[in-house]
Structures are given as structure tokens and as C-alpha cells.
């Protein structure tokens, strides 16, 4: 019986380093993303997850390591060559990043007009298809100011789909949305991944969303990659008992605390050791009483 063929990653990040001045934000981060999967990159604020996304799409130059998309290194590419790679992926920015002076249809049409030679009639058909995919075809002639935050996210997603990308990058897709709208965005991500066969990379710290959509999950902490595992591994860690947690190393305890939203653990201890109270008041103060976290609302 022949040996199974190893899958080649569609994205490969190897020992990625990124600095801003004297601050090193990414400290040798490595992981792969495979075709057709949803990879969730998570971590506390300041962990480096948004910087990681921007290095993956070529917005930030690297100070070390490499990023490969579709088997091609994006490091050091000329702008013309980098733009050719960028046509193969789409990005949903946290704000939606729509042009306020354009209708939703015009926003979606823009990348098609800029990067193809299609006739306007064909472009109009493509725009209707993309807006229908996200449930906004009937709102094509509205301006961003006339729609809700959730609709702006969906319109931004339609624009990200305009050039039929192989990869979709999402920067905090649930940020600023109410729970119902957030759940709708999650289901849209799942549906598009299944229907279109795209590979999705989602940066988020919303655990309900992460556990709903992820095939695999990656945990960043202070610019280092703590672990990259299947969702089941993270679910087992999240649901582990206090007694089990006491036998874990500090990294696993930290990940568990983040997943559960617990008030006590390595993350909070790190903040307590930062000397904030002494710096603020000139003296050590008792911590504010911490209450237990709530259970996840979605599985």
C-alpha cells in the first residue's frame, strides 16, 4: 500500500520576526495553513496577532524569517510581483474599510475594474453574485452610511470575494457586533469556506466565534507561538478541571485561562507583577475582587 502523500501548505510562516524600533513584536513565529481549512489565530491584546496577519499579506516587511503563499516567498518581492500574489487573496478588515462615497455595488466592483479587463456588463453580474453570497444583493445601491455594522462587514466580505480569491484573511470579523450578528458572520464564514473551497485565516480574540468556525487554532503570546493544534485539543484544554490544570505547565495554564476567560491564572499574575499599582499610587494595593467568567454562549 503506497504511503499517503504529505499535504503542502498553502501558507507557510517560518521563524517570522517583526520589529518596530526597539520593540520586537513577533519573535520567530512558525506555522502552516493548509488548503480548505479555517485557521484561527488568537491571543490577548498586544500578542502580535494583527501584526502577524499584516506580515502574511505583505503590508509589513519582515526583519527575519519568511512567509510563503502558494509556494512563493512574498519577502522582498517587487511591488508589481506582490500585487500579482495579492490578487489571489481577499481581506476583510475590522472596520469593513468601505468607501463611503460609493454604493455597496460600486465598492465590490472596484477591484474587478482595477484588476481585470471585463466589460461592465460582466462586472455588474459578478457584483450581483458576490452580494447575493453575503445576502446583500437587494441593498446594492445603498451607501455605507445607510446600513448597519453587520451589513458593512458582509459588504466588506463581498468585496474581498470580488476576484475569486483562494485565501480569505479576516481581521477581527466579530469586533463591534452584537451576539446575533456575530453568529451570522460566523455562519457566513463557514458557508463560504464550504461552498467556495477557500482557505480562511481568522484573527480574533472572540472565543465563541473561534470555537464555532475553527478547524485548527494557533495561540500567540507576547510575540511567540505557544501552540498550533486542532480545535478538539483546545476544547479539551478549555473544559479541563482545576485539578487537571494544576498539573499543567505554565504555557498550557495560560492558554486554558485565555480560552475560559478566567480571572486568575498566568495572564493575570503577569499583569499583577508589572508594578502598575505601585507606579500609579506609589504603593501596593489589593486587587479588585474578581468574579468568575461566564460560560461560552455558543459551542
Image (cartoon, grey):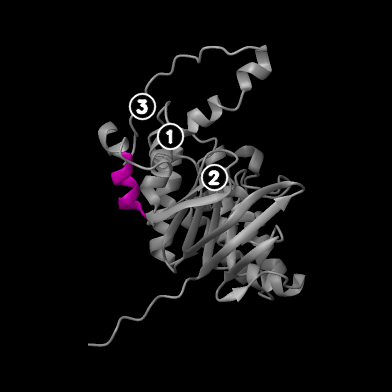
| C-alpha distance separating marks 1 and 3 | 14 Å
Q: Earlier in the sequence, mark 1 or mark 2?
A: 2
Residue ID for mark 3: 294
Q: Position of residue 236 (x, y in %)?
A: 28, 45
Percent from the top left, x then y, of residue 48?
Answer: 60, 47
Q: Residue 168 location, x and y as percent?
A: 53, 60
Task: Check whether the beta carbons of the residues at disc 1 and disc 3 lie within 8 A of each other.
Answer: no
Name the front one of labels 1 and 3.
Answer: 3
- Residue 264's quadrant in the figure? top left
- Magenta part of the protein: which range? 230-238
Element type where label 2 sits in the image = loop
276 and 58: which is toward the camera = 276
Sequence-first tag of 1 and 3: 1
Residue at 72% x, 61% y is 61
Q: Tell whether position 34 is magenta.
A: no
The answer to which of 156 and 75 lies nearer the viewer is 75
Left or right, 107 with reference to 150: right
Disc 2 designates what residue? 172
Around disc 1, counting alpha carbons within 10 Å, would you say few (fewer than 14), some (14 to 19), or many (20 or more)? some
Label 1 sits on residue: 179
SS state under label 3: loop
Q: Which element is circle 1 on? A: helix
Q: Quadrant of the C terminus?
A: top left
Question: In the image, 161: left or right of 103?
Answer: left
- As rendered, which of 198 and 157 lies closer to the eye? 198
Task: Please provide percent x and percent y for residue 37.
Answer: 41, 62
Amino acid at each position: 500500500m503506497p504511503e499517503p502523500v504529505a499535504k503542502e501548505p498553502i501558507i507557510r510562516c517560518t521563524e517570522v520576526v517583526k520589529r518596530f524600533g526597539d520593540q520586537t513584536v513577533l519573535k520567530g513565529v512558525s506555522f502552516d495553513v493548509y488548503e480548505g481549512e479555517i485557521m484561527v489565530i488568537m491571543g490577548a491584546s498586544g500578542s502580535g496577532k494583527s501584526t502577524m496577519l499584516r506580515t502574511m499579506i505583505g503590508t509589513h516587511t519582515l526583519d527575519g524569517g519568511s512567509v510563503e503563499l502558494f509556494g512563493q516567498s512574498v519577502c522582498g518581492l517587487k511591488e508589481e510581483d506582490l500585487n500579482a500574489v495579492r490578487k489571489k487573496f481577499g481581506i476583510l478588515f475590522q472596520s469593513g474599510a468601505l468607501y463611503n462615497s460609493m454604493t455597496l455595488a460600486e465598492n465590490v466592483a472596484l477591484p474587478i475594474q482595477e484588476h481585470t479587463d471585463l466589460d461592465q456588463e460582466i462586472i455588474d453580474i459578478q457584483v450581483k453574485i458576490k452580494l447575493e453570497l453575503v445576502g446583500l444583493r437587494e441593498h446594492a445601491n445603498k451607501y455605507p452610511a445607510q446600513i448597519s455594522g453587520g451589513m458593512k462587514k458582509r459588504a466588506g466580505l463581498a468585496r474581498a470575494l470580488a476576484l475569486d480569491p483562494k485565501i480569505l484573511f479576516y481581521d477581527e470579523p466579530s469586533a463591534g457586533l452584537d451576539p446575533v450578528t456575530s453568529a451570522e458572520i460566523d455562519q457566513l464564514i463557514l458557508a463560504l469556506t464550504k461552498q467556495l473551497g477557500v482557505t480562511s485565516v481568522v484573527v480574533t480574540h472572540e472565543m465563541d466565534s473561534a470555537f464555532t468556525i475553527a478547524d485548527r487554532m494557533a495561540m500567540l503570546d507576547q510575540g511567540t507561538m505557544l501552540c498550533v493544534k486542532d480545535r478538539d485539543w483546545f476544547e479539551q484544554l478549555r473544559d479541563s478541571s482545576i485539578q487537571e490544570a494544576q498539573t499543567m505547565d505554565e504555557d498550557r495554564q495560560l492558554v486554558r485561562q485565555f480560552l475560559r476567560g478566567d480571572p486568575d491564572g498566568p495572564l493575570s499574575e503577569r499583569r499583577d507583577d508589572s508594578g502598575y499599582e505601585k507606579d500609579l499610587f506609589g504603593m501596593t494595593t489589593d486587587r479588585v475582587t474578581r468574579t468568575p467568567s461566564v460560560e461560552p454562549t455558543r459551542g
